[in-house]
Amino acid sequence: MSDALTYLVQARPETMSHYFRFLKETGKHLDPKTRNLISVITKVHSQTERGLRQYLSRALREGCTPMEVIDALLMAFPALGLAKIVWATDIILDMDIPGFQPAALRGEAPVWHDVTPTSAVADGDVLRLDCDGRGLFVYRNKRSYQVYDSRCPHQSTNIPELALQGNTLTCPKHQWQFDIKSGECIKKGNSPLRKIESRVVKGKVQALW
C-alpha cells in the first residue's frame, strides 16, 4: 500500500473501508491468477512501479507463468500502448526473475551453478553471496544446506547481508521478516523467501536456475 493510501485509511477509515470492500467484491468470481494479472495490467496503465512489482509477484505465486504475463501485456496493447509496455518490461527485467530470462522463455533447461565450498559455511551459520549475477543466502544445518534468493517476494528488493540479525532476515524496504532457517515470512507479509533447488557435489554447494 502506498503512503498516500495508508494516510487515507488512517484519516478516513469509514470511507476507505467501503473502497477496499468494493475492490474485493469485484474480483470474487475470478481465480487468483486472473485477478492478479488484471491488477498487473492496471498498474502498467497507471505506471505505478510499486504496484506492478507487488502484483506481478502475486501473480507468479498464484501460478501465472512469465509467458502468460508477457501475453497479457501484449494483448492489452490497444489500451496500454507500446511505451507503457516497454516501461513495464524494463521494471520486470530489473526484478531479474529467472523465468523471464530469454533462455527460460525458450524452454531451455536450467543449469547447476557452483555457489560455495561447503567448508565456507559453518554449521548453523548463514552466508550471503553473489553467484553468477544472482544474490543468494545459504543456510547450513549440519549436512543440510538451504539456498534462498536474496530478493524479497514482496517487490523483489535485493536484501543485503546487514539485514540479517541472528536467524531473522528483514527486508529494508517494507520490513517483511523471514526465518532464514525455513524461509518462512514471520512478520508483515505472507509469502516465503524463494527457495532454490540445491545439492552438494564434491564439497561444493550447487544451485539450479
Image (cartoon, helix red, strand yellow):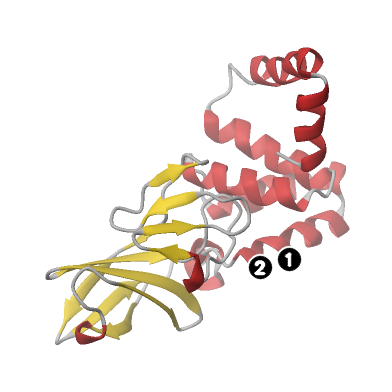
Q: Is residue 61 left or right of residue 158?
A: left
Residue 90, numbered label? 1
Q: Position of residue 14 (x, y in %)?
A: 77, 12
Residue drawn at 82 percent across, 19 percent down: 12
Q: Nearer the viewer, residue 132 or 11?
A: 11
Query: Which quarter of the image is occupied by the N terminus?
Result: top right
Q: To which quarter of the image does residue 168 belong?
A: bottom left
Q: Nearer the viewer, residue 50 or 104?
A: 50
Residue 94, numbered label? 2
2 and 1 marks in contact (CB < 8 Å): yes
Residue drawn at 72 percent across, 50 percent down: 50
Mark 1, Cα crowd under 10 Å, few <14 / some 14-19 / many 20+, is: few
Badge 2 amino acid: Asp
User: Disc 2 versus disc 1: distance between alpha carbons?
Assistant: 6 Å
Q: Position of residue 2 (x, y in %)?
A: 75, 41
- Identify the secondary structure beneath mark 1: helix
Residue drawn at 29 percent across, 53 percent down: 182
- Regarding residue 109, the answer to whether it shows in the image is no
Q: Nearer the viewer, residue 63 or 202?
A: 202
Q: Position of residue 178 (x, y in %)?
A: 41, 52
Badge 1 amino acid: Asp
Q: Is residue 139 left or right of residue 85?
A: left
